[in-house]
């Protein structure tokens, strides 16, 4: 991953970044100053460029704004400081404990599907149940190429033909994708993936307020021939990670929507 793939910074990078994030969160200067524990005057000086924010002040403001670790790094770099949070590959020794926990979670979810995605919804890992189900629907040849969770359901040549309630599923997934893309306007890689999704046939950006959060659960019903499986998906994130990669991972857990679906997944697992 490229941790520096952000939009070009403006002339007063720190001030403009802070104002942009503050406005997106509908916070006044007084609100942000109170949450960060600094004076309104000090915040005003930092936003206008009259004063340079120290590293500690920028981290306090980032925390008060609820910024992601990637955006906290961007704010620090805009202020002329080194990044605080690392961005490691899942094979790195430093994240071995987290990787072990993820592996255990995927195994224990058998015989129900579970996948791990990155911030661009690329599938990084899948348990055997998810691999079996996707292979049955898409074929073995498709499984040799990279998978993207959003594109899998939205593209006409992937899972979409097998999704019975596709309009509802597409609306739910697009609402979530738009919410995540709007929360990271500086992430050019994520913005590029979002624009690619919008170019797919019959896909249009949902009309939502930025403050509207997508629902935590999404139901999808898949059918191919005589096989019909209903799934309810839930998204899990890792708690309080101190690594950019770990914070951006999403574990997609799929539970059977009914007894028939449970029986079918158990049967496939045998």
Image (spheres, rainbow, N blue to C red):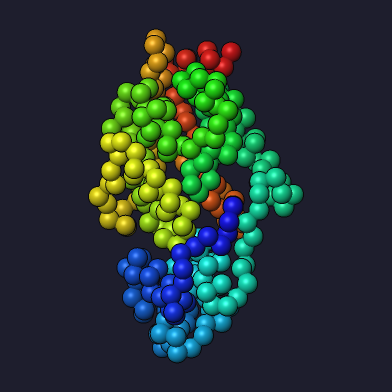
Residue 88, horizontal then vertical, whole percent: 66, 53
Q: Residue at 31% across / 53% down in the picture?
A: 212
Q: Residue furthest left?
A: 207
Q: Residue at 36% across / 79% down in the picture?
A: 30
**Is residue 106 left or right of 23 when viewed as pictured?**
right
Q: Does 181 appear above or below 161?
A: below
| Number of on-image labels | 0
Nearer to the camera, 198 or 207: 198
Q: Residue furthest right?
A: 93
Q: Does 100 appear above or below 240?
A: above
Q: Residue at 50% across / 49% down in the picture?
A: 119
Residue 74, horizontal then vertical, whole percent: 53, 67
**Is residue 36 left or right of 215 when viewed as pictured?**
right
Q: Does 133 appear above or below 254?
A: above
Nearer to the camera, 69 or 112: 69
Residue 81 visible from this viewpoint: yes
**Is residue 203 left or right of 80 when viewed as pictured?**
left
Q: Residue at 51% across / 34% down in the picture?
A: 147
Residue 257 visible from this viewpoint: no
Residue 232, horizontal then vertical, whole percent: 41, 31
Nearer to the camera, 31 or 206: 206
| Quarter of the image where the C terminus is located | top right
Q: Residue furthest top?
A: 226
């Amino acid at each position: 991953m490229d941790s520096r793939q952000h939009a070009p910074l403006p002339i007063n990078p720190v001030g403009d970044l802070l104002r942009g994030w503050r406005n997106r969160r509908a916070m006044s200067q007084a609100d942000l100053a109170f949450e960060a524990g600094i004076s309104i005057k000090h915040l005003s000086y930092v936003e206008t460029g009259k004063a340079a924010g120290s590293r500690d002040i920028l981290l306090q403001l980032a925390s008060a704004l609820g910024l992601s670790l990637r955006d906290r790094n961007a704010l620090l770099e805009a202020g002329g400081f080194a990044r605080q949070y690392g961005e490691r590959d899942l094979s790195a020794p430093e994240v071995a404990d987290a990787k072990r926990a993820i592996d255990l979670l995927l195994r224990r979810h058998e015989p129900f599907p579970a996948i791990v995605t990155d911030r661009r919804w690329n599938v990084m890992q899948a348990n055997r149940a998810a691999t079996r189900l996707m292979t049955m629907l898409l074929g073995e040849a498709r499984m040799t190429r990279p998978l993207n969770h959003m594109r899998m359901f939205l593209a006409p040549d992937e899972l979409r033909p097998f999704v019975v309630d596709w309009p509802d599923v597409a609306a739910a997934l697009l609402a979530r994708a738009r919410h995540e893309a709007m929360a990271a306007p500086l992430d050019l890689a994520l913005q590029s993936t979002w624009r690619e999704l919008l170019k797919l046939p019959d896909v249009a950006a949902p009309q939502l307020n930025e403050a509207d959060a997508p629902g935590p659960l999404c139901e999808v019903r898949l059918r191919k021939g005589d096989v019909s499986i209903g799934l309810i998906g839930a998204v899990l994130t890792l708690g309080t990670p101190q690594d950019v990669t770990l914070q951006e991972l999403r574990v997609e857990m799929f539970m059977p929507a009914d007894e028939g679906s449970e029986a079918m997944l158990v049967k496939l697992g045998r």
